[in-house]
Image: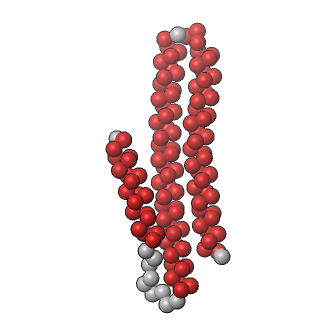
Amino acid sequence: MKRIITLLVVVVFLTAVPLLASPNTEGATNGYAQAKTTTNMSLIWALVIGGAAIALAAMAGAIAQSKAIVAAADGISRNPAMAKNLQTLLILGLAFIESLVIYVLLIDLIIFFVKWGDIIK
């Protein structure tokens, strides 16, 4: 499973670089039209990569949260007296894991609005 995810990430990021570097000049008669086409392709690939990043972050966060819950349930079943302490640590850990996914969402939104601002200019 890790190999498939790694392969998917490598393919997405490596194919984005050549596509952003070579502008689509079909039908472009002047430099403005060519720059606009390049910017539109840049926006499209920023959205694709941003979507892939948020999907991978959400998937990794969900896997990490499930492992944390399993470990906490196992710890509580072995020592019920520590349930309150484990519950506190579990909630704190889940909040940290979820905050990482929210950070990826924030970075995606920043990339999207910066690229969108380039098109409006």
Query: Residue at image x 51%, y 26%?
Result: 69
- With respect to residue 96, does 19 lie above or below? below
**Residue 73 at x, y = what percent?**
50, 20
**Residue 50 at x, y = what percent?**
52, 57
8 with respect to 47 (left or right): left
- With respect to residue 121, does 28 lie above or below? below
Quadrant the N terminus occupies: top left
In the foreground, 102 or 11: 11
Q: Where, by quadrant of the figure, is residue 15 drawn?
A: bottom left
**Residue 18 at x, y = what percent?**
41, 68
Query: Residue at image x 55%, y 10%?
Result: 80
- With respect to residue 60, does 44 lie above or below? below
Looking at the image, how many numbered discs can be counted on the residues?
Answer: 0
26 with respect to 90 (left or right): left
101 with respect to 21 (left or right): right
Query: Residue at image x 64%, y 69%?
Result: 117
Quadrant the C terminus occupies: bottom right
- With respect to residue 82, does 39 lie above or below? below
What colour-coding does the image apply?
secondary structure
Query: Residue at image x 45%, y 76%?
Result: 23
12 with respect to 75 (left or right): left
